[in-house]
Amino acid sequence: MWEKELGELLLRIGARFPRVEPRRRVRDYVRGLLGPVGRKNGWQLAEYAGHATPDGLQHLLSRSRWDADEIRDDLQTYVAEQLGTDDGVLIIDDTGFVKKGTTSAGVQRQYSGTAGRTENCQIGVFAAYATSRGHTLVDRELYLPKSWTEDRERCRSARVPDDRAFATKLELARVVIRRAIASPLPIAWVTADAAYGQDAHFRRFLEDAGLSYVVAVPKSQQVHGPRIDHLIKQAPLEAWQRLSAGSGAKGERYYDWAAARLPAVVEFDGDEPARQRWMLARRSIAKPDEIAYYLACAPLQATLTDLVRIAGCRWKIEECFQSAKNECGLDQYEVRRYVGWYRHITLAMLAHAFLAVMAGQEREKGATRETRPTSWTSHQPRFAVCWQLDPVAVPRTATTP
């Protein structure tokens, strides 16, 4: 079955390659990314495909005529068909690719959350898509620091397009979100870590796009004046509830959660509330001093259980990064030029999406009619306790906190 499904996926993208040689090479490249290849670089992928040299695969990534963005569009359509549900979640995060030298597009010494320190690396901003049926990467943008965009000769050497200007990671995140909205992917929610969630313009962008969200924020985040950690300290003991943020490698991930409703969002063309803003906190059971903070904007009928599910969903992009790197060679490329980065990353994402779809189909086959979920929404408990904030401390306003 896997061979048939993979053949259909490769046939789907085959129309993007006008000549037979690149169609064959992309087939060999993707099969190599999925195959038992120790390190998925040019030589080993070529050897796995039965090529005498890696020249053909290198040509595919560097000089062959095809558009990686078209393959990305096919990937999003494929994921929408195979994994899409109406309550789909788009997850935004970035990851680092440690590199040597100074010629790889976008490389410089910069902080990498992947390494947990400053490294000589490239940074990619990614979007993952998650539902009850599976999760996988669906978009990517290479971050180019000012040390690159202000040196046009250096950009030309790495084949960076002349019209590519400096853009922050937040701006790149908005780019991939806009594309996801325009794609066939059904998206109801967005989640991201504090690097993105702390930005009020980013949150307002999501609200203006009609998307609900749960985003992490730092403890110093101000909510209409007071810091969020100071407000959370107002929570009475009964406001904290033990809920699962989803299953992990060791089973359900339980934390203590507390939430408070903030002023509702009122649309410009009416007086009735359209969505409800929230703040919430996640406290470690083993280490109660470890508290994470979130801001949310959700449908009026949403409960704390719904918000907890979305907050816990953010870790799925970390799982995507790990599995795409370990199993599909996401970070094992040897290309240095801008176009080569996008081509390799996109094909590795395609390979990862195929694995995610196959895993989802296997799970559905193993599920009985009684245990197969009809909705991704957890039903434990039906109603969540939330406490009412002091209205003096948090004034009622329709502006984004």
Image: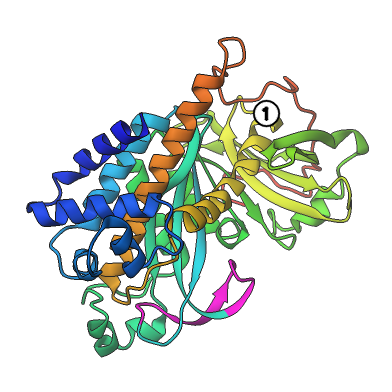
Q: Where does the N terminus fall, quadrant-wise?
A: top left
* Residue 128 coordinates in the image, percent (x, y): 46, 47
Residue 336 in the image: above or below residue 291: below
Residue at 67% in and 41% down: 278
Is 111 in the magenta?
A: yes
Residue at 50% in and 20% down: 365
Label 1, secondary structure: give it. loop
Extreme-right residue of the structure: 237
Residue 4 in the image: above or below residue 294: above
Give the amino acid at mark 1. Answer: Thr
* Residue 318 coordinates in the image, percent (x, y): 57, 53
Is 365 in the magenta?
A: no
- Number of marks present in the image shown: 1
Extreme-top residue of the structure: 370
8 left or right, relative to 364? left
Work out whether residue 268 can be spotted.
no
Q: Quadrant of residue 285?
A: top right
Residue at 73% in and 48% down: 394
Given residues 278 and 152, the one toward you in this image is 152
Q: Quadrant of residue 152?
A: bottom left
Q: Which residues are magenta?
A: 104-118
* Residue 78 coordinates in the image, percent (x, y): 32, 36
Residue at 55% in and 59% down: 196
On the image, numbered disc 1 is attached to which residue?
A: 303
Color scheme of the displayed model: rainbow
* Residue 144 coordinates in the image, percent (x, y): 38, 75
76 left or right, relative to 255? left
Work out whether residue 318 can be spotted.
yes
